[in-house]
Amino acid sequence: MAQHSAHTGSHGGHGHHSDSSHDEAHGSFKSYLIGFLLSIVLTIIPLVVVLNHWLEGTGAMVVMLGSAVLQFVVQLVFFMHLREEKKPRWNLMALLLGLLILLVIVIGSIWIMAYNQVAQ
């Protein structure tokens, strides 16, 4: 912070400056663009796999779930700036609890669907 206040003090506090740590905390155009492109790729991959019947059944489900988890990580890192957070990590703890609940629901659903296929 001392560098930031010293830098703004030299411009009378009104100048526009490019402090890289300040810009990174809010996200740069480059980071948003990378996140956007990764999101598109992670959406297209399972779509192409399923539409072209490259994998079926469990294999297709693994590709879709893997892509969804990677999409989740991309959203957290590039758009929600989780890695730049310097405050107490209460948001991270709430997020982890939500992720645990999500995993229980998804794994339970897969388990039920697999059991239903075996029973038929």
Image: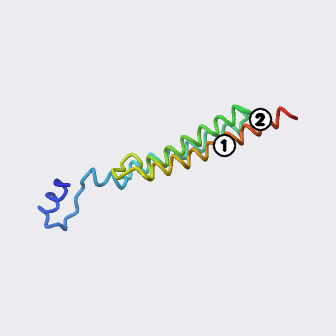
Residue 72 at what x, y percent from top left? 53, 46
Marks 2 and 1, how far apart at CA: 12 Å
Residue lying at 43% horizontally and 52% vertically, measured from the top left? 90
The quadrant of the picture occupied by the N terminus is: bottom left
Residue 107 at what x, y percent from top left? 67, 39
Q: Is mark 1 on a helix, strand or loop?
A: helix
In the picture provided, is 60 more to the left or to the right than 66? right
Residue placed most toward the observer, 88 or 75: 88
Check disc 1: other Cα within 10 Å, few if <14, some if 14-19, many if 20+.
few
**Which residue, given by chain and number where applicable, does mark 1 sit on?**
106
The quadrant of the picture occupied by the C terminus is: top right
Residue 79 at what x, y percent from top left? 45, 52
Q: Taking 15 as reference, is 58 above or below it?
A: above
- The quadrant in which residue 68 appears is top right
- The quadrant in which residue 58 appears is top right
Q: Which amino acid does label 1 sit on?
A: Val
Residue 96 at what x, y percent from top left? 51, 46
Please tell me which of labels 2 and 1 falls first in the chain.
1
Judged from this view, the residue extending furthest toward the left is: 10
Q: What residue type is labelled 2?
A: Ala
Number of marks drawn: 2
**Which residue, given by chain and number where applicable, does mark 2 sit on?**
114
Q: What element carries label 2?
A: helix
Q: Taking 65 as reference, is 15 above or below it?
A: below
Check disc 2: other Cα within 10 Å, few if <14, some if 14-19, many if 20+.
few
Q: Do the residues labelled 2 and 1 touch (CB within 8 Å)?
A: no
- The quadrant in which residue 34 appears is top left
